[in-house]
Amino acid sequence: MQLGTRILQNPICLAAASWQLDGTGYEQLGAIFTRTVTMEPKPGLYEEGIWQVADQTLLNATNMRTESAEILVNEHLPNLCRYGVPVLVSITAPGIPGFRKIARFLKREAGDQIAGVEVYITTHDTSKGYELNAKFVREATQAVRNELGRDAAVVVKLPPWPEHIRSLAIGAQEGGASALAATNTLKALHLPDDATGDVLAGGLSGEALRPVALRCVYELAHDERVALPIFGTGGIFTAGHVTDYLRVGASAVQIASGEWLEPGLSARLASECAHLKPSAVKL
């Protein structure tokens, strides 16, 4: 898969990579995408904020902790770069100035270490958030592209909205994206068995998300206006799941929940799926 100025060696990529990533086989991956960071840290929970709510399905709590870009660069990036595969930093911000600021910081402090960034597009949980539409996606992507320069990879990760994802993708493409990722988490609620327990709000990932994410990839791959390669992401646990995403039009996949539930899964699938080519399994 062509990603910016690079060609990924493998269709399997690790997303939301653990800061303490350890083990073997990760050098076979196509790329490593970090956990999403912001310019300033957001206090909250780490692993305690991830709940398994069904079989191979996770709810990532709204109050999850978000590390700052500075901590990523100073403390965590060397660990992720040591595997010798492209590392992309996943970033998010409440508005265009925020995306511009964090992209500028990463270019200055880590431009020689990272292959690019993933622009994590999501709606915000308060009324202060910007409206999420194609114009916002285009301007956020363009702000990041202008700061990073033309050679860096800019992957735009879109929300799981099959009925709207095509227009958002066009916005990303017009803003200078190198690739698209479909999708990020689906907003959901979990009610604990204890009727007195707090309702858990967050983003759904894993098995339950896969059918929606597959539809989103299909929508993008079958829109003649969309000329960007696509990462499929959501509920990938087997080589068969990887093939499913390639069949509907993805060029590569990202594994996040599967790695959290089964550490080392992405490395194992990278070994099993190195031979897969999108053109060989196209519908």
Image (cartoon, rainbow, N blue to C red):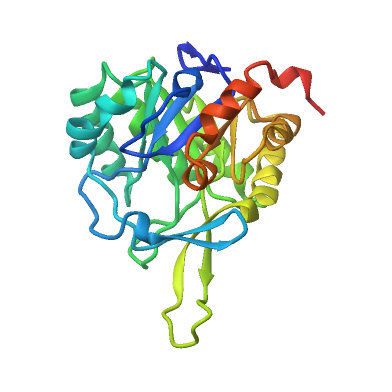
Mark count: 0
65 up-or-down from 281: above or below: below
Q: Classify residue 100 as left or right of residue 187.
A: left
Q: Residue at x 45, y 68 (%)?
A: 201
- Can you give x and y, in whole percent of width and height, for residue 18 in the image? 37, 39
Q: Quadrant of the N terminus?
A: top right
Q: Nearer the viewer, residue 100 or 160?
A: 160
Q: Classify residue 91 as left or right of residue 164.
A: left
Q: Classify residue 60 as left or right of residue 38.
A: right
- Can you give x and y, in whole percent of width and height, for residue 74 in the image? 17, 31
Q: Residue furthest bottom?
A: 196
Q: Residue at x 21, y 31 (%)?
A: 73
Q: Quadrant of residue 78?
A: top left
Q: Quadrant of the C terminus?
A: top right
Q: Quadrant of residue 98?
A: top left
Q: Residue at x 67, y 15 (%)?
A: 275
60 up-or-down from 16: above or below: below
Q: Nearer the viewer, residue 267 or 209?
A: 267
- Can you give x and y, in whole percent of width and height, for residue 40 in the image? 20, 48
- Can you give x and y, in whole percent of width and height, for residue 125 in the image? 39, 64
